[in-house]
Image (tube, rainbow, N blue to C red):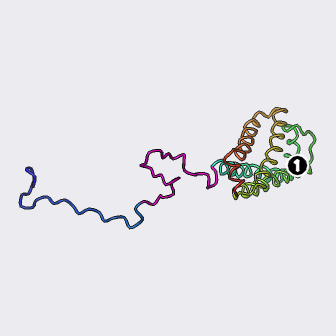
Amino acid sequence: MYPNQPNPARPYVAPRPYPPYPGPAMPYTDFPAGLVPHQRGWHPDLLDTTQGRPGTVIAAAVMAYLGAAVQGLTGVLLLIGSTNPGFVRGFGTGSGLIGAGAGLIAVLGLFCLVMAAILVVGGVLAQSGRNIGRIALSAVGGLGMLLQVYSIAVGGFLAVLGLVWIATGCALLWTSRANDWYRRT
């Protein structure tokens, strides 16, 4: 009993302890060389964290999906615009393709749709550990970088963002962790 207890007739009783957890006492037993976190010499970097898909591969695939969305939207808009005579007349003035006909605009739209499809398929394959997906994304990225450099050369300074986006996505697929993961899968 405590001296300042509010009701001396009912003394304070400590609550019962919680029952033990029904699972294993130490669920994480896969520490290297039998080391556990409280032992000296253990460090989180000693754990093998490379078994899962690297974040760089996930980031590159997400970037490919977002690029595919932009490419797909551009392709659809070009295909729709190729049927509008006003769009066809105004298309060549801003893009450097003066005198471009409706057929060329439709071909560019189809090209964008094909690139979008390759980006989606390449992203899925790259995320699933297939090296062919990484190669496909890198090849399409190389072509995209060349087209971005051309756009910058003719005065499209917004293409610098596209160039940086594509180069970053390609570089993420070829980091050392990504290379190790593709080698194992």
Residue at 64 percent across and 51 percent down: it is 54
Would you say residue 50 sits in the magenta stretch? yes
Which residue is nearer to you in this view: 159 or 15?
Answer: 15
Would you say residue 115 sits in the magenta stretch? no
- x, y percent for residue 147: 83, 41
Can you say which quadrant of the picture contains the N terminus?
bottom left
Q: Which residue is mark 1?
A: 105
The quadrant where residue 145 appears:
top right
Which range is magenta?
26-54
Which residue is nearer to you in this view: 68 or 138?
Answer: 138
Residue pushed farthest bottom? 22
- x, y percent for residue 67: 73, 48
The quadrant where residue 141 appears:
top right
For the residue marked with disc 1, what is the amino acid?
Answer: Ile
In the picture provided, is 32 more to the left or to the right than 171?
left
Residue at 50 percent across and 45 percent down: it is 43
Q: Residues within 10 Å of mark 1 (few under 14, many from 20)?
A: many
- x, y percent for residue 56: 66, 47
Residue at 42 percent across and 59 percent down: it is 26
Callout 1: helix, strand or loop?
helix
Can you say which quadrant of the picture contains the C terminus?
bottom right
Residue pushed farthest front? 33
Taken as a whole, is the magenta stretch helix, strand or loop? Answer: loop
Number of residue marks: 1
Which residue is nearer to you in this view: 16 or 106?
Answer: 16
In the picture provided, is 7 more to the left or to the right than 114?
left
